[in-house]
Amino acid sequence: MSRSGNKCAYVGCGKSARLEPGLKLYRFPKDIHLSRQWILNCGNSDLADLTQDELYKRHICGHHFLDKNFTSFNKCRLKKSSFPQPFVEIDSSDIPVNIPLKTYSA
């Protein structure tokens, strides 16, 4: 794993090992079927047009995997059949927003 500034390709993440020491980045798998599942789960539609070689140069950070996806407790290696958690788009209408109300007296 290189620390040359690779960023997480998961939509909305963009974390990098250079800016966050200790962050683990995992390459997209060489298996085409598994890598397609990674693309679907990470929510980044730009990745769908990449060749398999280009995709292999992209990474997903460890924050997007469950503990059970790793071979050991220290999260160094992913199991071969692992894939990132599915991206779930949040509907902004479901988020309560409190707007302070100012009142003025004459």
Image (tube, rainbow, N blue to C red):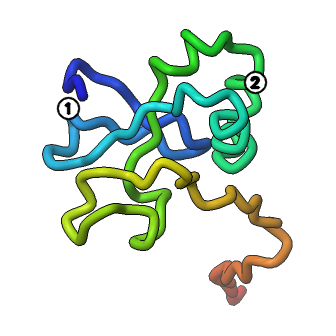
Q: In this view, does 96 lie above or below 3?
A: below
Q: To which quarter of the image does residue 39 belong?
A: top right
Amino acid type, label 1: Arg
Tag 2's secondary structure? Answer: helix
Instruction: Work out which quarter of the rendered image holds the C terminus and state it.
Output: bottom right
Tag 1's secondary structure? Answer: loop
Residue 100, image x, y percentages: 63, 82
At a point 45% along the width and 18% down the height, the residue shown is: 57
Instruction: Work out which quarter of the rendered image holds the N terminus and state it.
Output: top left
Q: Is residue 17 above or below residue 48?
A: below
Crowding at dot 1, Cα within 10 Å, few <14 / some 14-19 / many 20+, comes out as some
How many labels, in total? 2
Crowding at dot 2, Cα within 10 Å, few <14 / some 14-19 / many 20+, comes out as few
Q: Residue 48 carries which label?
A: 2
At a point 44% along the width and 72% down the height, the residue shown is: 68
Q: As rendered, which of 105 and 93 lies closer to the eye?
A: 93
**Distance between the alpha carbons at the discs numbered 2 and 1:** 26 Å
Q: As rendered, which of 44 and 26 lies closer to the eye?
A: 26
At a point 73% along the width and 82% down the height, the residue shown is: 96
Left or right: where 46 falls relative to 4:
right
Residue 73, image x, y percentages: 23, 71
Q: Residue 18 carries which label?
A: 1
